[in-house]
Amino acid sequence: MTLAAPPATTNRAFHYWQGEFIDDTEATVRLADLPALVERALAEPLPTETVLNACDTLSAALRDPASAVRERLHPQLADATGDTTEVGETLTELAAALARPALERKLRRELGGTGPARLTRPDARETVFEAWAPAGLLVHIAPGNAAAVAPLSVVEGLLTGNVNVLKTSSGDTLLAQHLLAELAAADPTGAIARRVVALRFPSGRREWLRLMCAPADVIAVWGGEDAVAGAAELAPPGCRLVEWGHKISFAYLTRVAWQDPATLEALAADVCRLDQQACSSPQVVYLDTEDSEEVFAFAESFAPVLAKATAAALDTAAASPSTDAAAAPQFLDTAAPPPADAAVPPVAGATIPPSLDAAEHAEITTTELLTRLEQHLGLTKVIAADDGTWRVLADTRPALTASPLHRSIWVKPLPAHDITATLRPMRRYLQTAAVGGSRGDIARHSRTLLTAGVLRVTPVGGMLDSYDGEPHDGVYALQRYSRRVSVQTDDTFHATACLDDLVAATPTPAPPTGDLLDKAGVQAQLATLAPEHAHLHFRSGGTTGTPALSVFTNHDYDTQMRAAAHGLLAAGFDPARDRAANLFYCGGMYGGFISFFSILERLNATQIPLAAGTDHAAVAEALITHHADTILGMPSYLWQLFNSQGEKLRAYGGIRKVFYGGEHFTAEQRRTLNDTFGVEVIRSASYGSTDLGPLGYQCTHARGAVHHVLTELHTLEILDPQEDRPVRAGQAGRLVFTSRTRSGQRLERYQIGDLGRAVQGICPCGSHVPRIELLGRHGDVLRIGTYFYNYRRFVETAQEQLGHRGELQLVLSTETTGEHLTVRLEGEYATDPQRARTAFLTAIPELGMAVTEEKLLTCTVEIVDGTALERTAGSGKLRTVVDLRTASA
């Protein structure tokens, strides 16, 4: 995708305001109107998917070495990092942090799903709706020593639907402003731009800070105690202050660990990564000992290991930019900076690298000088590189001490029994602890360290590693930027799964414009699918051909089952009262039974998991014994069950609801279930496919084959049956789906073989979710004797002309005299075969002409037992059309 270039800046335009760059004068005017801006912006919902799409588009551009986006950002990044060799690393980290899979995982971990703003029922037994709502105005006060903190913080604010006002330091480049402008340019709706303001000014400009913070609902501030205190003074009553203060991290080693060369190498690598600039970088190494001599001995043995790691790190940095994407989330962490004291003369004999600024130089020099002085008291020992690139500071006192950073590490004793007493007083500053030892040591010490106030425990060598959705400083940021809201309703909402659907349709992006995808294309994709995207394997029922494989990630499957569960609620299933028997087919990797087991589980429903068994008598007995009043299954199987166990089930009279999938009941079959067996509700449980999962659902007002489209999962196009163009409103066409929530296999513009038409207007149930009427499959239209016939016409003729209530199957074959059509009618409900043949030839004129006048084919009607009709092995579906012509040719 080619992104439109964001607006250009001028020499005095330091601020990005809702899609344009402005100067100080204009920013002053607009800040005065900030409360009104917030109200206008919040009146327009910001769909989470809009943010995910824009972030993923920008991520792809950042990964492309030839993209114009990288070229536009390069000057800002070079200035921000101070080293052009770091530009590639920063772009890689930003791309990783903005990728859709990473953000989706973050949303699932922190807010429970990828659609957290939708008012849905957390417990389907209750008509209580809950959602995560934006806090409102989120003010970000970013640090000056971590270039990407600011834009990534705003992304978190956008994921939670907030209006975001960002302050960056006057000493920063315009990296944050330009990156956010690129993000807004990736959103064709303009909704992101309307929720972003990014200003650059010094903290001394108190009036601007006051105008920013006065209407704030949340203030997120990075920095030390002074920065937090300054923000707290400006926070209005009721405003939530989210502190991302500086933290200290350390390693804790048992004897077996500190004597292990591999552990020492891993520890040295942690010290050298990012020059200890992350909060998760180790500043202290604690040894599980009380012996001062062991502390000094460890310092002596660790020093050459650190020297070797430092040399390797500096050589790598000089040779090429790093592409260590694992540290991307650590942009939201900054180690405690050195104080801005005046420079101190360097220690005699020591050399400080010229890349350090005056404050860093002063902090390192002061720390090393004082530590060397205490060597005379036997308290400390300093081992440092001649060129000043690293230093090990051994200290016999266990108190936690901040390091001056830049590969400076303290070594201290801390016996296990003193961990809590020593560290708990510093708990507000603690972040990461890397524990080295046996499995038992790690488990035991991890619990103790967490009790003392540590927020995260990692292996040695993995302190800076992170994972998508990891808590930050002990909390989930997205929850801190949101409100958990609820709406309580009465029982008139028992069939409503999402309140938002009664207000407006779910916003969906424009349909994709790429090539159409067929089943063969889907199967070809599987050959290149990564293992992490193929957790769950299903095979289709094989109704229209050879069973095909479909795969899902576990998260994708969960998302789809929850959406299908909402659809079953809308169809009239009541989890609080209904006792559901799951009678779908099971086994052979077929997903029918498993999927509906998952759906009922997510509805917290009472379930009797029988599956479709061949012993109909045993199934009927189980239904009666366990007081089932609701059954779910394939129409063909349920029809056989009611037929074979009619007397028993009529006497029971307890089946009130039937929810079906995969096929449809005919009008006569519905009438029989209503009149003979007392079934009150007969409705589709779900419309879907094995490849795509659930696609639609019926509501209590649905009639026939009309379904609402699951727009929270898919985008639907209806294309002309012959040409690849959209049909006019209300016309029938091919149904083409694009799945938008699959983190694994991406199915775009997939034509699944179904025909349908859009149903106009708002549904009588009140939902604004679009509707379609299913009109059968392409395979239902068959050609024989030069004419085309639709299977549905045979079914309608059998019902209307013959009063047939059973199943019907068409068999196409080739005989010596030409092509032959056999119409098979289920025997219990069939009339005389000759009368039936006459009815078909009369009601379907082209069939009568082809048989009687043109002699293009022959036609017979067979009366057969229902068990003799051909069905698919996997799903048990009736094969509506059996074409034997190829096999007999």
Image (spheres, rainbow, N blue to C red):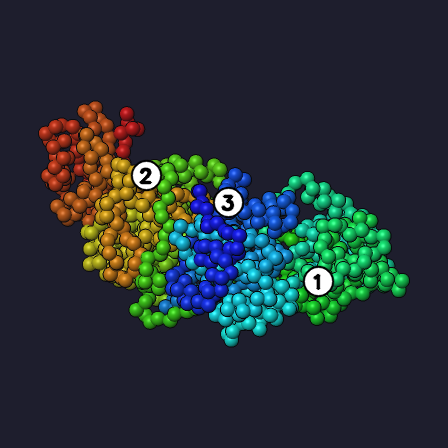
Residue in front for this viewpoint, 5 or 511: 5
Q: CA distance from mark 2 to mark 3?
A: 46 Å
Mark 2: which amino acid? Thr
**Residue where numbered disc 3 is placed:** 69
Q: Give percent across and percent down for residue 811.
A: 24, 35
Looking at the image, is mark 3 or mark 1 nearer the viewer?
Answer: 1
Which is closer to the viewer, label 2 or label 1? 1
Asked whether the residues under the numbered discs 2 and 1 touch, taking CB atoms below 8 Å apart as contact, a structural biologist would say: no
Amino acid residing under circle 1: Ala
The percent position of residue 571, horizontal first and vertical second, equals: 30, 59
**429 relative to 146, above or below:** below
> Residue placed farthest to the right in the image?
376
Helix or strand or loop: what does disc 2 sit on? Answer: loop
Q: List the residue tagged with mark 2.
A: 544
Q: Earlier in the sequence, mark 2 or mark 1?
A: 1
Residue at 38 percent of width and 57 percent of height = 565
Q: x, y (%) of residue 871?
A: 31, 41
